Amino acid sequence: MDDGGYKPGASKSQAKIVAELRGVSKRFGEVLAADDLNLAIGEGEFLSFLGPSGCGKTTALRMLAGFETPTSGEVLLDGKVVNDLEPHRRPVNMVFQHYALFPHLTVERNIGYGLKQQRPKLPAAEIERKVREALEIVRLEGFENRRVWEMSGGQQQRVALARAIVNEPKLLLLDEPMAALDRKLRKEMQIELQNIQRRLGITFVLVTHDQEEALSMSDRICIMRDGRIVQTGTPRELYDRPRNRYVAGFVGTSNFFDGKATNVNGTRAEVTLPNGMRLAGQAVSEIVPGRDASLSVRPEQIRLERAASAKDGNLEVTVLNRIFLGEHTEYLVENQSLGEFMVLTPRQAELSDGPFNAGDVLYASWDADSALVLDRD
């Protein structure tokens, strides 16, 4: 299993560790929600927990926040064990999925609420200054006296974010904060969050089940399954070199052809399908001959042509469906031996070669180096 160690890039070579999970597990009765989590989070990093519902990502976030106490293991902030430290005493703030704003308070009073609870008490002028700066950061100047129920979903999210950053936490936790937003607004807020995080230098930890969201925003992504960390890496590492079929299927879109691993030779291997057909690809992790394996091919790596090329590996396919998506077109095709699989064709290719239509008989091919042989586990 991935140890989740922080491997800072060149620009963060001096980054220190601000939060750690060391052998952390959490049980709710008979349910093991988090199982032996080991993860180090660097200062100024944007890290995402990615996985399906029930995989343990929110439990991990809540243990960092202090809303849940580990059954075993240690949670550390700035090198200190904080298992028993109350949430309000941690240098951590959290933006909840449904924002948890006070509907009877103005925007200004919502943002300044936490500041007014600090002891010793801050001067009123200091609170006003901090609230004004937070409003500027989230681009809500002039909304001070607005009631939150008078605002759009995107504006409410900005208020929740301003309330979280006004206390200058070392760690900002985001629990699917964009789940309620429409696609266009979600895109805008993803860019906004990145800009804010870079401007402030605060460590962000995001929980999401949206792979596109995690890929577009994160320095690193922590893939979770059944309460465990499966693999941690940069978006490019996870996309190009997934550890197994589960990770490849959860990070981006892929076609899988299942069979047994054969002819394993270093970084090369084959998958022999039940019908005897053999497909070759890169072995990016340890592949054991004879074990269940999958050949993974990303849809954008597959070429569709009207005539068979001179290269080996041409597969005769029939177009079953065509979906125009603007920048590319998605084709569902079928091969007699491989069954159905997906192909993405860029817009530029269609402008020069013309689109394909349902019922067309074409030839599909891909480079062996673009195919991955993956463990099915």
Image (cartoon, helix red, strand yellow):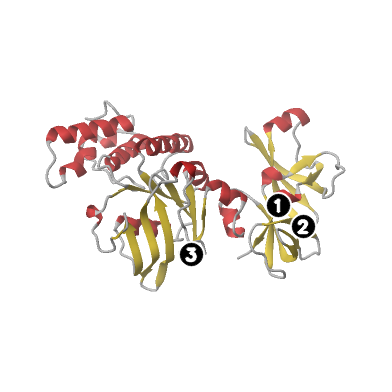
Say which amino acid is labelled 1. Answer: Ala
> Which amino acid is tagged 3?
Asp
- The earlier-in-sequence mark between 2 and 1 is 2
Circle 2: element type: strand
Percent position (x, y) of residue 96? Answer: 33, 48
Disc 3, disc 1: CB below 8 Å?
no
In the rendered image, residue 331, in percent from the top left (x then y), is placed at 70, 42
Q: Position of residue 319 (x, y in %)?
A: 76, 44
Q: Say left or right for 159 vs 357.
A: left
The residue at 39%/74% (across/down) is 30
Q: Considering the numbered disc 1 on the image, is that residue within a helix, a strand or a loop?
A: loop
Vertical order, 316 against 124 (above or below): below
Residue under label 1:
371
Point out the tag, 3 or 1, that comes first from the N-terminus.
3
Q: Is disc 2 surrounded by few (<14), some (14 to 19) or many (20+) residues within 10 Å?
A: many
Contact between marks 2 and 1 (CB within 8 A): the answer is yes
What type is the residue that disc 2 sits on?
Leu
User: Which residue bears the numbered disc 3?
Assistant: 226
Task: Left or right? Give the position of 311 relative to 241.
Answer: right
Residue 236 falls left or right of residue 77: right
Q: Which numbered marker is on residue 279?
A: 2
Find the residue positioned furthest to the bottom.
30
